[in-house]
Image (cartoon, rainbow, N blue to C red):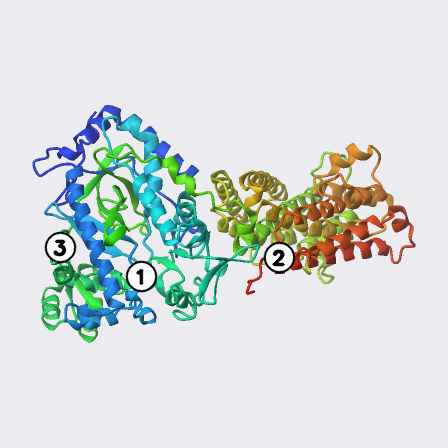
Amino acid sequence: MNIFKGYVSKSSFDEVYDKEKKIRASWKDILHDIEASGVELLNEKQAEIDWQIQDNGVTYNVYDSKDTASSRSWDLDAIPFVIEEQEWNEIKRGLKQRAKLFNLILKDLYGEQRLIKENIVPAEVIFGHKGFSTEVFDFGEKEDFNLYFYATDIARGPDGKMWVISDKAQAPSGLGYAIENRLTMNVVANELYPNVKKKKLTSFMRDYQELIKKLAGGDISTAALLTPGPYNETYFEHAYLSAYLGINMVQGSDLLSKNGALWLKNLKGLKKVNTLVRRIDDRFSDPLELRSDSYLGVAGLVDVMRQDNVNMINPIGSAILENIGLNPFMEKIAEYFLEEELILPQIATWWCGQEKELAYVLKNIDKLIIKKIDRTGQIPIYFIQKLSADERVALIRALKKNPHQYVAQEAIGFSTVPYFEKGKVEPRKAVIRTFSLKKEDNNYAVMNGGLVRVSSSKENLLVSSKGGGISKDLWILGEDKIEVDSASMLQDNRYVETSIEQISTQKAQNLFWLGRYLSRSIATTRLISHVVKKITNFYRYEVNTSKESQVIFQQTLTHTTMTYPGFLEEENKKKLEVFPMREISSVVKDTYRGGSLSSTISMLANANMSLKDLLTFESWKLFDKLQKEWNTFAHRKGDSTLTVAKELEKVLIYLVAYKQLVNESIFREQGLVIYEIGYMIEDALLLIAKARPMLCLKLDKSVGHDVLEGMLNSMESFNAYRAHYRSSLTLNNVVEFLILNPQFPKSLSYIVDKLLEEFKLLPKVKEDVTSYEELMLDARKILEGIDVDALLNIKEEEGVYMELNTVLSSLSDLFLECSNEFSNTYFSHHDE
């Protein structure tokens, strides 16, 4: 069967077939292997690729998405984009030349400004662009003020040559996705394409790691990757690259500028950072000197650069290089700096700030594409044919009013490549993102591969990940002359959080709250599930739950979740007794109600997202399934009581499984102890919150038995109690079991002892007993002084065991204060 039988490209250039419909030389082996494999195997391998991508948790976050989730699955096509080695070598020459030029431009614009003084580039092109940072003017003379990492988007034009589409300099993305694409394709390549040999990417990544190490003075532990955080569109890549390169991933809140240097706030105190791989746009990098409303950067970062105390990949100020207004002058710049012509052609571009060029643009506007020189996702590309009459008039008016802010470009069609979908191959437009890295003496290395993005449909002319585009792996045909051992990449990764002292305060705080929110989610789900089952007599025992015990369970739910007034509201008391599911449904599904299960799971999701670089792929995947299950349930209306009970059981199973995976994901040196401390503190607080309304009331025998059983079941502890006591339920035994039993992992006594053990594993600034340890030692004294019989034999006042209630209240205060002191010790901003 000829898979390419229906493949017809309307483009002026197709990568596979020439104008005579003959297969181009570079694609012969690929097409031969595809035809030999057949549709069935290609389908099978595409499914395997999709599974690998999903299993590895590869995502791309999309802002303003109509989907409820903010992330999209990454799409990778089974058919690569191939380029012959001879052609690629010429492309590489052009990319290296362009990288050199942009480095010279960067140093000149923030230094002598010869390009402006000698009228090579109009001043308005530079100073009219928001990417020019006056704050770093005169930094160009600094030795380490360089364009270290540079990305270029290229596409093949109608003439068959690769054309430069755009340049990315301030925080280029895509490298991590390109590496993941290659690793995924390697899984299927040998079976699908046995006759095709391609160049490897390992040497480029090795060079990248060596560059970071060199800039860090030989100590890679002083390097970090600065990310905007988990909601950035390429956050997956940030986590991926930091792990691959063996450096810490940090957020702005993890860092502190002090005494002209940059410091990482970790559990031990402050650690100096010498090199920063910056993935935050220039203007957001320093709220002190740049955008004051930015929460992403580090106040004082520009001054640290000024003091020559940090090397940055890439330095603040690089955004000016993404100015498309430079394109019309690149030929003159190449001649001025290098005495060379541009090797790679650019799309013909006219800067409208010149009278002659503006006149040409206005005369030929229907044939051109209009763009603003500032790069921002909020400003569109103007396709004149798609504008209404009024929009066209408005654009022309804007061009005449502020011509220096606009460029016009020739509308050219990109080449098409084969894309496999649903058993068919069809042509799609494609753009290649290439990556270059600075080496010695202003030379650059170019990766023998790249990230290929193809349009989302045959009709779509735009190629964009945000627009739902698909990716391909770029294969440079040929073999590497020097074999690089990929395992050697790991030799210098030994720094990455091999000691708990090296964990950043932000990550430690996320681990702590992951533990607390996970404990709260599980406990709340169990308690709600128990309350719902009691309402429906869901348990198999042939005993109807009394109204009195039901009210106690429901009020316990309000106390535990703190969703007041809830079941404690006197005005609607009768209505709540008759229709309790209305209130329960709100406690379950109302995301905007503090303490609800929905809001707790939402906060758990935030903590999970923030730790994506630490947790395993299995954890991500399971939590994704949990969220999908939860979202379906939470947005559905009219569920019966029985359905609610069943859905809660499903959610509980996911939560418990996720807990197990978290425990298996994190080494103690990576912060497992901090997660466990958070989990145990929350466990203790929730136990007390349930015990006070359920164990401190003097009840008659039948109701008391029901409540005691409910208390144990809500903690999944009934069987453990039976195994320990083998007698009927008594208040004395339950209090002893849940509060004083040092062998039972859920008891307060066990939790206090375990916390004191865990505290010893944490770094301390001084040798003295810490404030949070003192609080748990006080809790231990209270527990050791409890005599259960005496506690429960004291005369009751108004049907309440006041002494027990007081003890529990005191313990609750100690756990809360312990949490606060622990947070103040390790999560506050160190400035000493």
Q: Is residue 480 above or below residue 349?
A: above
Is 615 left or right of 783, judged from the image as shown?
A: left
| Residue found 40% across the figure and 45% down from its top | 245
Quarter occupied by the C terminus:
bottom right
Residue type at mark 1: give it.
Phe
Quarter occupied by the N terminus:
top left
The label number, if any, that marks residue 145 in the structure image:
1
Instruction: Determine whether label 2 and label 3 are within 8 Å by CB.
Output: no
* SS assignment at label 2: loop
Q: Earlier in the sequence, mark 3 or mark 1?
A: 1
* SS assignment at label 1: loop
* SS assignment at label 3: loop
Sort mark 2 into few (<14), some (14-19) or many (20+) by Cα contacts within 10 Å.
Answer: few
Q: Which mark is in front, 2 or 3?
A: 2
Residue type at mark 2: give it.
Val
Q: Which residue is mark 2?
A: 765
Q: Quadrant of residue 145?
A: bottom left
Q: Residue furthest bottom?
A: 401
Sort mark 1 into few (<14), some (14-19) or many (20+) by Cα contacts within 10 Å.
Answer: many
Q: Earlier in the sequence, mark 2 or mark 3?
A: 3
Q: Is residue 362 above or below residue 454?
A: below
Residue type at mark 3: give it.
Leu
Instruction: Determine whether label 2 and label 1 are within 8 Å by CB.
Output: no
Q: Which mark is in front, 3 or 1?
A: 1
Q: Which residue is mark 3?
A: 342
Q: Earlier in the sequence, mark 2 or mark 1?
A: 1
Cα distance in 3D space between marks 3 and 1? 24 Å
Is 524 left or right of 337, judged from the image as shown?
A: right
Cα distance in 3D space between marks 2 and 3? 58 Å
Instruction: Determine whether label 3 and label 1 are within 8 Å by CB.
Output: no
